[in-house]
Image (cartoon, rainbow, N blue to C red):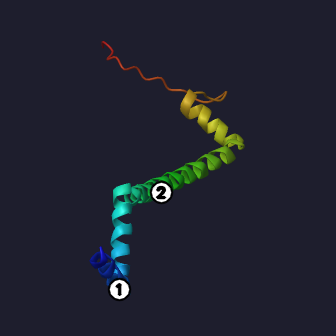
Amino acid sequence: MSQILSGLHDFLYHPVQVFWTCLIIVFTSLLVDGTFIKLWRLQHDRQILITRIDQAKSRSKQLEYRIHQAYQTEFIERQARDQLDLVREGDLVFVFSDEASDI
């Protein structure tokens, strides 16, 4: 028993050994606990969220621009013509047939 206490006493009087031993114990406990893996996952998730936020900001700017355009009558008229095939009174409309005619 006195040899163990003597060895412990000698060990404690070497601060570099104590430091490295404590460092190894802390590293091992964090590795076994899974804290390092959790930190890596959090960093990875952070990068994904930053990318999604940037995409959402870009989409938001596009939508704001379209909302701003929607207040203009020219934009509304152009959308009605393009998407709903509407025409103004007096416009000339051409209708083309897909079927071949018998001549």
Residue visible at 47% across and 57% down? 46
- In the displayed structure, 39 sits above or below 6; it is above
Binning the other alpha carbons within 10 Å of mark 1 as few (below 14), some (14 to 19) or many (20 upward) gives few
Q: Nearer the viewer, mark 1 or mark 2?
A: 1
Binning the other alpha carbons within 10 Å of mark 2 as few (below 14), some (14 to 19) or many (20 upward) gives few
Residue visible at 60% across and 49% down? 60
Q: Position of residue 97 (x, y in %)?
A: 40, 20
- Residue 25 found in image quarter: bottom left
Q: What kind of residue is marked 2?
A: Arg
- In the displayed structure, 46 sits above or below 74; it is below
The quadrant in which the C terminus is found is top left
Residue 59 vs residue 51, the one in the foreground: 51
Residue 57 vs residue 9, the one in the foreground: 9
- Residue 22 found in image quarter: bottom left
Q: Residue furthest left?
A: 3
| Disc 1 from disc 2: Cα separation | 37 Å
Q: Which residue is labeled 1 in the image?
A: 16
Q: Position of residue 95 (x, y in %)?
A: 47, 23
Q: What kind of residue is marked 1?
A: Val
Q: Position of residue 76 (x, y in %)?
A: 66, 37
- In the displayed structure, 21 sits above or below 49; it is below
Q: Secondary structure at mark 2?
A: helix
Q: Which residue is labeled 2 in the image?
A: 46
